[in-house]
Image (spheres, grey):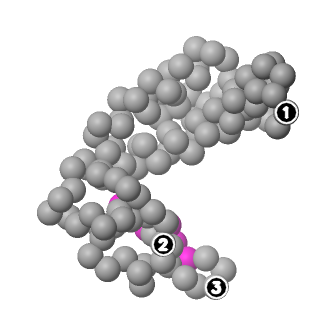
Amino acid sequence: MTQARLPNLGDYIYGEMDQIALERLISEIETLLPLISTGPWKADIKEHMGKNWLLASMGADRDGAQWILTTDHVHASELDGDAEADAKFCAAARNVMPLLIEALRKGSASSGRVE
């Protein structure tokens, strides 16, 4: 069962996502792209952050390492974007990814390509 949260819309969709809902989610991501912090981004442990800009703290893993989402060689003085847009983008990207993979697999299967 696929579940997706539509950021800012507050709707939950269970089962297969219909085309309208998918388009709304993709539109949300397109709106956020110019507003998010300068890339590239990377996942790393806090000890390796250096002067990179912290985008999000993800918490500790089972071994106690503090995982973060950070920029890669982008310092705060060079940063465009804001925290709200970054958070909404991360949530939207997480929610749309399974749907995009499913759509790509269907497209690949219908074109006769082997996965």
Residue 14 percent location from the top left of the image: 72, 29
Residue 93 percent location from the top left of the image: 52, 42
Residue 81 percent location from the top left of the image: 25, 48
Task: Please give the residue where the numbered disc 2 appears in the rendered image.
Answer: 44
Q: What element carries label 1?
A: loop
Q: In this view, does 106 lie to the left or right of 38?
A: right
Task: Tell me, yes or no, if residue 28 can be seen here.
Answer: yes
Q: Nearer the viewer, mark 3 or mark 1?
A: 1
Residue at the limit of the structure toward the top, as seen here: 20
Work out whether mark 3 precedes mark 1 in sequence or the reverse, and give the earlier one: 3
Task: Please give the residue where the numbered disc 3 appears in the rendered image.
Answer: 63
Mark 1 and mark 3 in contact (Cβ < 8 Å)?
Answer: no
Residue located 36% across and 49% down the image? 86
Residue located 48% across and 77% down the image? 45
| Main secondary-structure element of the magenta-colored stretch | strand
Work out whether mark 1 precedes mark 2 in sequence or the reverse, and give the earlier one: 2
Q: Give the quarter of the figure containing the N terminus.
A: top right
Res. 112 image quadrant: top right
Residue 94 percent location from the top left of the image: 57, 45
Q: Which of marks 2 and 3 is in front?
A: 2
> How packed is label 3: few (under 14 Cα within 10 Å), some, or many (20 or more)?
few
Q: Is mark 3 on a helix, strand or loop?
A: loop
Disc number at residue 114?
Answer: 1
Q: Is residue 85 left or right of residue 92?
A: left
Q: What stretch is highlighted in magenta?
A: 55-60
